[in-house]
Amino acid sequence: MLRTENRELSLGTRRKSRELTLQMLFQSEMGKQTPDEVRRTFWSQRADVEHETRGFADDLFRMATERTAEIDALIQKHAEHWRLERMAAVDRNILRAAVAELIAYPETPKPVVINEALEIARKFSSPESVHFINGVLDSAAQNLELKK
C-alpha cells in the first residue's frame, strides 16, 4: 500500500498525481476502457513520470474505480438538483477523484483535498464549475466526517 510513502510526497508531486488521476478517470469513462486498459495505455505514453507521482495517481485511480458506486452515490447525494450523467465529464471525474481521496486518505486534511480539486477544476474546467465542485465536496466531506 502506498499510503505511508505518500505522506512524504510534496504538494507539487501530489498535485501532478491528482491531475493524472483525473486524466485516467476521464480516459476510462470516455473511452469505455477497463482500469487495466487505462493503466496500460496511459502509462505507456508517460514513461517520464516519477515513481512517487505515478504511485499516488495509481492508488487514487484504483480507489475511484473500485468504489465507483459508493463514490457516485455520495456525489449524487450532495449535488442537489444535478444528476451525475448531466454533469460535465471533467467535473464528474474531478469529484470522483477528490471523493476517492477523502475516503482513502482520511489523514489528509479535507480542506487540502477540496482546495486541490478546485485548483484542478480551475485548470481543466470552467469558472462556474469551481463553485459547484466546492459545494459538492464541502458537503460530502462533512458527511464523511459525521460517519466517523
Image (spheres, grey):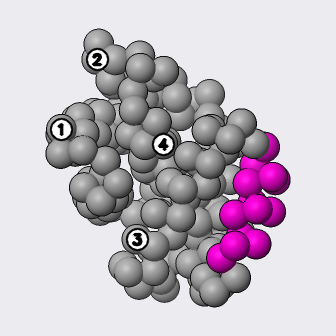
Badge 1 crowding class, 10 Å Cα cut-off, few under 14, some 14 to 19, many 20 or more, is: few
Lower sequence index among marks 1 and 4: 4
In percent of width and height, residue 145 lies at: 36, 41
Q: Is residue 89 above or below residue 40?
A: above
Element under disc 3:
helix
Question: Which residues are the magenta region?
Answer: 34-46
Left or right: residue 87 compared with residue 129: right
Badge 4 crowding class, 10 Å Cα cut-off, few under 14, some 14 to 19, many 20 or more, is: many
Element under disc 4:
helix
Left or right: residue 83 compared with residue 53: left
Residue at image location 53% in from the left, 34% down from the top = 71
Residue 117 in view (yes/no): no
In percent of width and height, residue 134 lies at: 23, 42
Q: Which mark is residue 15?
A: 3
Asked if disc 3 and disc 1 are in contact, CB closer than 8 Å, the reply is no
Q: Is residue 35 above or below residue 129?
A: below
Residue where numbered disc 1 is placed? 128
Secondary structure that dominates the magenta span: helix
Q: Amino acid at mark 2?
A: Glu
Lower sequence index among marks 2 and 1: 2
Badge 3 crowding class, 10 Å Cα cut-off, few under 14, some 14 to 19, many 20 or more, is: many
Quarter where residue 126 is shown = top left
